[in-house]
Amino acid sequence: MRLMNEEARGTDAEAALEPDGESRNIRLLIAYDGTDFSGWQKQGASPELPRCRTVQGVIEKALERIHKRKIALTGAGRTDAGVHAAGQTAHFHSPLRSMAAERFVPALNSLLPQDLRILRASECLHDFHARFDARARSYRYYFICGRHGLPHELRYSLQLWRRPSVNRLNAYARRLLGELDCSVFAGAGDKSLSRSRSISRAHFFTQGDSLVFEIRANAFLWKMVRSIAGTLLSCEEKGLSEEAVGEIIRSRDRTRAGPTLPPRGLFLWHIDYYRE
């Protein structure tokens, strides 16, 4: 089943270049620091809304310089403003037949800013689609617990002044597994036709002196991961029982959920595909 809304909103404005039989389909693995980006998806300019700096827009400008023509880039997930990525996937159709696919890595990185890197480039099947062929997305949210975060850490983690119980948080997280109506975690602007999602992993773990929340699902509602993390932490702080948390999840009532955490601690971590 192809679900299309991953921590983002809006209509699909990522019209891919129509394959013409002469072009190659190139798949990219991308990492970025989302702090100074207005999200993945490029925005149209208007007097009321000046053109924003987006990951998609910046890469497409670099592709245009290489190809001497406009090239459309399609990503696996439209991360929101301020959200980072360690494993974003995207594809584009390139008419450059003589350029080895792996050469797009140094070529693009030489044109891109330091907060955006191409990690890998490879030729893929002509009908591969970074978004529609995705089987699951994984996100991680990072926390600094019980100590002052260093300045560079606070760009990528949320400061917590306490050390929550990992065991209790994981007992809550198990309530999320399986096919789930996620209405309680949907952002107010979410436009998904269905709010049912299949969650295959949801757990907290420590990494050094940091706390990490990892979740994997077939797709996500807008702001869903940040809402889940904020809700489970709020419930843990209040000492709620597993049964009470389950009742909140089943209620489908957004007013019963906890706060939506800020984007700076969130990473799009990995994309799984039906065909690699």
Image: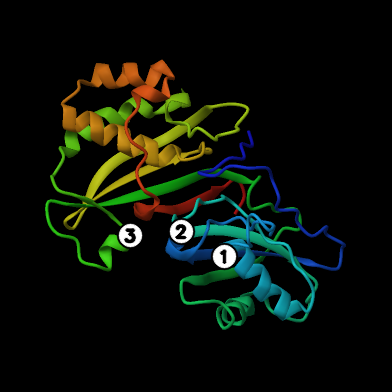
Q: Which mark is nearer the camera, 2 or 3? A: 3
Within 10 angstroms of label 1, few (less than 14), some, or many (20 or more) residues? some
Judge whether 168 appears above or below 78 on screen. Answer: above
Picture quarter with the N terminus: top right
In the displayed structure, does residue 45 sit left or right of residue 238? right
Q: Which mark is nearer the camera, 1 or 3? A: 1
Q: Residue, x 57% and y 81% (percent of image)?
A: 106
**Circle 3 sits in a helix, a strand or a loop, which is it?**
loop
Estimate the x, y position of residue 47 in percent, counting from the top left. Answer: 68, 58
Earlier residue among tags 1 and 2: 1
Task: For marks 1 and 3, give the CA distance.
Answer: 19 Å
**Which numbered dot is residue 85?**
2
**Which numbered dot is residue 53?**
1
Which amino acid lies under the numbered mark 2 shown in the image of this protein? Ala
Judge whether 25 appears above or below 206 on screen. Answer: below
Which amino acid lies under the numbered mark 1 shown in the image of this protein? Arg
Judge whether 276 appears above or below 114 on screen. Answer: above
Q: Quadrant of residue 157?
A: bottom left
Task: For marks 2 and 3, give the CA distance.
Answer: 11 Å
Nearer to the camera, 3 or 253: 253
Picture quarter with the C terminus: bottom right
In the displayed structure, does residue 186 sit left or right of residue 192? left
Earlier residue among tags 2 and 3: 2
Q: Which residue is mark 3?
A: 156
Estimate the x, y position of residue 49 in percent, counting from the top left. Answer: 63, 56
Q: Quadrant of residue 93?
A: bottom right
In the displayed structure, does residue 134 sit left or right of residue 236? right
